[in-house]
Image (spheres, rainbow, N blue to C red):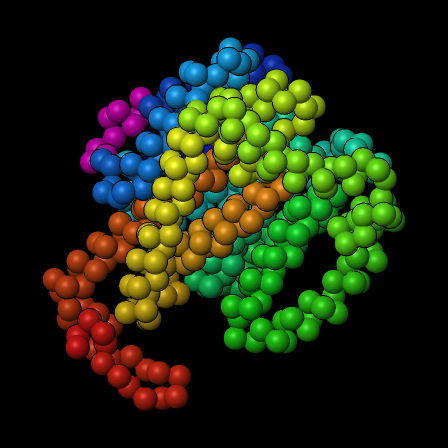
Amino acid sequence: MHWLLIGYMFLFIDRPFEVWPWLGDLRIERIYMCLTLAVWAIYPNKRFLPNGQHLAYAALAAAVLCAWVMSPWMDKTQPVIEDWFKIIVFYGLLVTTVHDEKALKKIVLGFLAVMSLYLMHSLKEYIAGRHTYRMGISRMIGVDTTLGDPNSFGASIIYVLPFVAAIWRTGWGGRMGRFALLGYTGLSSLCILLTGSRGSLIGLVLWFLILMMTHRKRFLWLALFVCGAPAVFVALPDSLQNRFETIVNPEVGPANARESGEGRIDGLLNGFTLWSRNPISGIGPGAWRPATGSIVESHNLYGQILGETGTLGAIAFASVVGCFVMNLLWVRKVKQAYPEWSQEFVFQVPAAIATSVFLLLFMGNFGHNLFRFSWLWYGGFLIISRYCIEERLAHAAAYPEELAEDAYEEPDGDWIPHPGHV
């Protein structure tokens, strides 16, 4: 079952049926999901793991469905609803069949492997000449059409990078594993630069800063970053240098680049305007363009939430974020009580999710990511992680003699009692 879930991750992210249309004619995604559901139906011991985040997602799904039903553009936006509810189905499969640390590790590593194939496939196509020409430059795109836009493609890369750092801290794969993770980070950085996406570059820099500031040798890494960043910038083609310079100096770019940056603010303001006209349920998911007459989407998460789902959607989304925070704080509390567990996979996954959720919220200021799969997939990973930790705590309480030591060593060499044995 777990390998089937990883296989669906590949179909959902790389979307080969969008690369080769004849595969789309065969409906392989639908056939694959039907097969997965059939296996799930006979899968033993499946159950929902107890967690309040399920209710938050249910509230969000109800709010989105209500907004869609009440939308005057209901017929035009049906694909948006169908695609998002497919993600909800996958979420249900995930949290009902993955219940232990080994399976969670397999799923997360499989997710990273899928992203690696996606990036390599996209880079291969870019080298072969596949790109889009926008804002006066040639920009790398993903191989798919759903999230292959330069901005969406870059954002997809950013939201996965925290898992690289988390896996690194666990010591996975030894030396070869670290080489693989460094290679993935380099590939991700290259793809982001080639997209010419200013928002994604800001996200990449922010992720590097978070990574460095949480390292014990933070000042050394900051110094290396400050020295290395200009060298990377100079190595870029002039067109990309000019593109990224517009982040701090909009005057050096074309007029449409300045308009694009201002459009992020307009997206928020237009969201408030649409909300004032439809305060309860908004204009409906995916109805931004027909409702505003704009040729582009909102490019702003908060404008998208208010404008497309109204007050109901805003409250439901806030509850989802609140559940993320509560689960992450609970994990942090356990980690503080059992510091010898902190580098293990089941504790590092929540750390990665915390960073990813922060990046989702931050980059939401210049990207409409409400219906992105990350919110549900990462929520599922977090729920599973918490359940595994709860199981570990229950086992430790029942069999305290199995803990490695009754005490642990502080960095200064002093020994203090294990908090579970005080």
Please state, as top left, top right, bottom left or bottom right, where the C terminus lies in the image: bottom left
Establish if 164 lies above or below 365.
below
> On screen, 64 above or below 197?
above
* Residue at figure coordinates x 23%, y 76% from the top left: 418
Q: Residue at x 35, y 35 (%)?
A: 57
Horizontal side of residue 394 vs 67, given as left or right: left
Judge from the rendering whether residue 208 lies leftward or rightward of residue 376; answer left or right: right
Image point (29%, 28%), residue name: 40
Furthest-left residue in this view = 398
Which residue appears at 31% of the width and 46% of the height?
Answer: 384
Q: Is residue 42 magenta?
A: yes
From the viewer's perspective, is residue 247 above or below residue 303?
A: below
Q: Give the total number of marks visible in the rendering.
A: 0
Q: Position of residue 167 (x, y in %)?
A: 47, 57
Q: Is residue 303 placed above or below 146 in the rendered structure?
A: below
Nearer the observer, 232 or 38: 232
**Is 27 positioned to the left or the right of 280 in the image?**
right
Residue 264 covered by magenta stretch: no
Task: Give percent across and percent down for residue 99.
Answer: 27, 44
Position in image of residue 192 (x %, y %): 68, 46
Task: Tell me if residue 119 can be seen.
Answer: no
Residue extending farthest front: 276
Of 118 and 216, nearer the camera is 216
Q: Is residue 190 left or right of residue 402?
A: right
| Magenta residue span | 38-46
Note whether residue 241 is visible. yes
* Relative image position of residue 181 (x, y in whole percent): 56, 56
